[in-house]
Amino acid sequence: MVKFCWKYKFDLTAFLISLDLAAIVGLSAVYTLDYQHSNLLCLVVPGLEDPTARAHLVPTFTFGETEVFDQELFQKGSRMYKFQNFFCRIFGFYFCVFYGQGFHQGSVGLFPYSRPIDTVVGEPLPLPQIEKPSHEMVDKYHALYVDALSKLFDKHKTQYGCSDSQKLLFL
């Protein structure tokens, strides 16, 4: 049995991420609670691309992933919105209400909608092996990765159902 207490706030978030349960934290979580349909959100954290690794960085983008479930959005100031913020202060991630299809056609449930999910893969970005990379070096390769990801999205967005004016936002 696992006991959770207040001091394990960040460990709970890491635990949920390790179980492949998407946890949206920090500024990006606030943005997703105020979701705007005209933009797509992409969170790329500098430092996760490890320049000491021998593997290449490969930019990938998945289209349609946000269409397999619907999310219930609550008005600012409503009880549920306040509960989401309260929950985040305690556990370190936002509680969200999502739904998909049920067993029967037209019913609501927790199964994903049957919609296509397409992943596009960009050109690998070679990285040199660096024993102790500086912050400037990490920032350099982070900028290259973000630029490659942005170009990949712009190249394929109309092919997979996004409008030509749709932008990819990086937080």
Image (cartoon, helix red, strand yellow):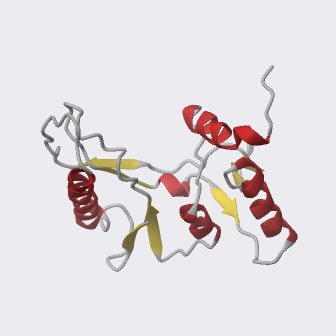
Q: Is residue 81 above or below residue 68?
A: below
**What residue appears at the point 62 percent right and 73 percent down from the top-left corner?**
34
Q: Quadrant of residue 82?
A: bottom right
Point out residue 35 in the picture as x, y percentages from the top left corner.
59, 71
Q: Going by the picture, which residue comes out furthest to the right?
A: 79
Point out residue 93 in the picture as x, y percentages from the top left corner.
67, 52
Task: Name the side, left or right, on which 163 lies relative to 152.
Answer: right
**What residue appears at the point 58 percent right and 60 percent down from the top-left corner?**
26
Task: Name the side, left or right, on which 126 lies relative to 19.
Answer: left
Q: Decide which of 164, 143 is in the foreground and name it.
A: 143
Q: Quadrant of residue 12?
A: top right
What is the total number of numbered labels drawn onto the structure image?
0
Point out residue 29 in the picture as x, y percentages from the top left corner.
60, 61
Task: Name the side, left or right, on which 22 lies relative to 150.
Answer: right
**What residue appears at the point 67 percent right and 60 percent down from the top-left corner?**
71
Quarter of the picture containing the N terminus is: top right
Quarter of the picture containing the C terminus is: bottom left
Q: Quadrant of residue 162?
A: bottom left
Q: Decide which of 26, 136 is in the foreground and name it.
A: 136
**What residue appears at the point 78 percent right and 24 percent down from the top-left corner?**
2
Task: Name the side, left or right, on which 137 lies relative to 91.
Answer: left
Q: Is residue 37 above or below residue 147?
A: below
